[in-house]
Image: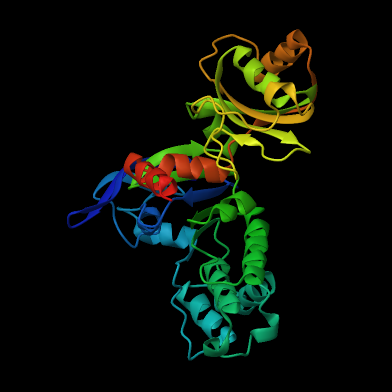
């Protein structure tokens, strides 16, 4: 349906897209995700024939965007971030103009207009001047012009930009409904947008592909460490703190919180009383010398280089049995889309600057 192979695009000395490749299958809702300036809009403009790649190739419905741009444009419906609406027209007049521009047969134009109006929920404003429409209805009008010729592919650039929360929900619902019948490429920098409507995502950063796949596929391919949360019953905080180091492949203690007692301990810094977390200068918090038995919530990191060893949850369960502890809960902390996005689009320098800011009093 859509094939992009090593496309590159520069504007003067600015390299907007640096060798991006991906494919979108029929009937898929595919998200282009990335920070501002990542190259999302440039890629969409190349797919729609408004810009041409400097190198590489892109094909839409079998048509090359460079050699056959008219056929490409006939195959798609395109909603730019700033949809060019003729505000002096009312909705019906505007859609009639679009139907004529799309070369829809005169006998079919009214039928297509009525379908687009009904699909996009514009019936109550069809005779209203576009200049007097809310942002939500303007975006709906933009979607109507994109689907009026019933294309098999929809390309939407920041479709909820500038809308209020209720309008955003309405547009997302509409996109999901359209995605049941059409192939949709959705560009956004809003994480919730992708989670709400997209089955697969391409994460861009500085004009390059940072990751591609479902959230689960990207998370499983990210190298690093695994974080587990579990709850120990009938033990002291000090005993658990010491014992977790005996869990196979233990890397570090992230957090230990004695529930029902003041002042849990956190490896990331001092608690509210100024005490350092475990592993920092040997400082101790509440529960010293075995006091404070009860429910202990623990978060630890295990090294991911475990080879063919058992799963982390099994390692923690076996450890609890060997130590004589009772577990009431255990959870493998999954990467959220936000975790993945930050991990893949934050530079090392930005990480250092953020950590420096957090250390400042």
Q: Position of residue 133 (x, y in %)?
A: 58, 85
Q: Is residue 89 above or below residue 144?
A: below
User: Which is nearer the eye, 255 or 118?
Assistant: 255
Q: Residue at x 57, y 51 (%)?
A: 194
Closer to us: 225 or 23? 225
Q: Residue furthest left?
A: 13
Rendered view: 263 above or below 43: above
Q: Is residue 144 left or right of residue 65?
A: right
Q: Is residue 306 found left or right of 329 in the rendered image?
A: left
- In this image, 143 relative to 115: left or right? left
Residue 95 occupies which quadrant of the picture?
Answer: bottom right
Choose between 142 and 331: the one closer to the eye.
331
Q: Is residue 24 visible?
A: no
The residue sitting at 54% across, 86% down in the picture is 130
Name which quarter of the figure residue 228 lies in.
top right
Which residue is depicted at the point 55% across and 66% down? 160
Spot occupied by residue 221 in the image (x, y as percentages of width and height): 50, 28
Give how far across and how far down residue 85 sits, in percent: 47, 80
Q: Is residue 329 visible?
A: yes
- Looking at the picture, how far across and down is residue 311, in whole percent? 65, 16
């Amino acid at each position: 349906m859509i094939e992009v192979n090593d496309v590159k695009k520069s504007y003067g000395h600015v390299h907007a897209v640096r060798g991006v490749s991906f494919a979108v299958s029929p009937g898929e809702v595919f998200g282009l995700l990335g920070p501002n300036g990542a190259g999302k809009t440039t890629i969409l403009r190349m797919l729609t024939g408004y810009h041409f790649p400097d190198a590489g190739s892109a094909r839409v419905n079998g048509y090359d965007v460079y050699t056959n741009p008219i056929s490409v444009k006939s195959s798609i419906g395109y909603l730019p971030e700033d949809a060019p609406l003729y505000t002096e027209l009312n909705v019906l007049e505007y859609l009639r103009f679009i139907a004529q521009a799309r070369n829809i047969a005169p006998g079919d134009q009214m039928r297509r207009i009525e379908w687009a109006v009904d699909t996009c929920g514009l019936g109550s404003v069809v005779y209203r001047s576009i200049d007097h429409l809310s942002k939500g209805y303007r975006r709906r009008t933009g979607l109507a012009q994109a689907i009026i010729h019933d294309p098999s592919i929809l390309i939407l650039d920041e479709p909820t930009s500038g809308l209020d929360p209720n309008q955003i929900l309405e547009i997302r619902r509409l996109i999901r409904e359209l995605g049941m019948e059409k192939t949709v490429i959705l560009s956004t920098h809003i994480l919730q947008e992708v989670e709400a409507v997209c089955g697969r995502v391409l994460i861009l950063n500085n004009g390059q592909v940072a990751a591609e796949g479902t959230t689960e596929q990207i998370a499983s391919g990210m190298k690093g460490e695994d974080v587990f949360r579990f709850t120990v019953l009938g033990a002291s905080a000090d005993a658990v703190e010491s014992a977790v180091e005996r869990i196979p492949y233990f890397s570090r203690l992230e957090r230990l919180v004695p529930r029902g007692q003041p002042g849990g301990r956190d490896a990331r810094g001092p608690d509210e009383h100024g005490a350092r977390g475990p592993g920092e200068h040997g400082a101790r918090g509440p529960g010293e010398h075995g006091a404070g038995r009860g429910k202990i919530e623990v978060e630890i990191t295990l090294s991911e280089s475990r080879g063919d060893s058992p799963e982390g949850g099994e390692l923690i369960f076996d450890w609890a049995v060997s130590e004589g502890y009772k577990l009431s809960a255990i959870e493998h902390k999954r990467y959220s889309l936000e975790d993945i996005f930050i991990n893949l689009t934050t530079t090392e320098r930005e990480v250092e600057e953020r950590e420096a800011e957090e250390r400042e009093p």
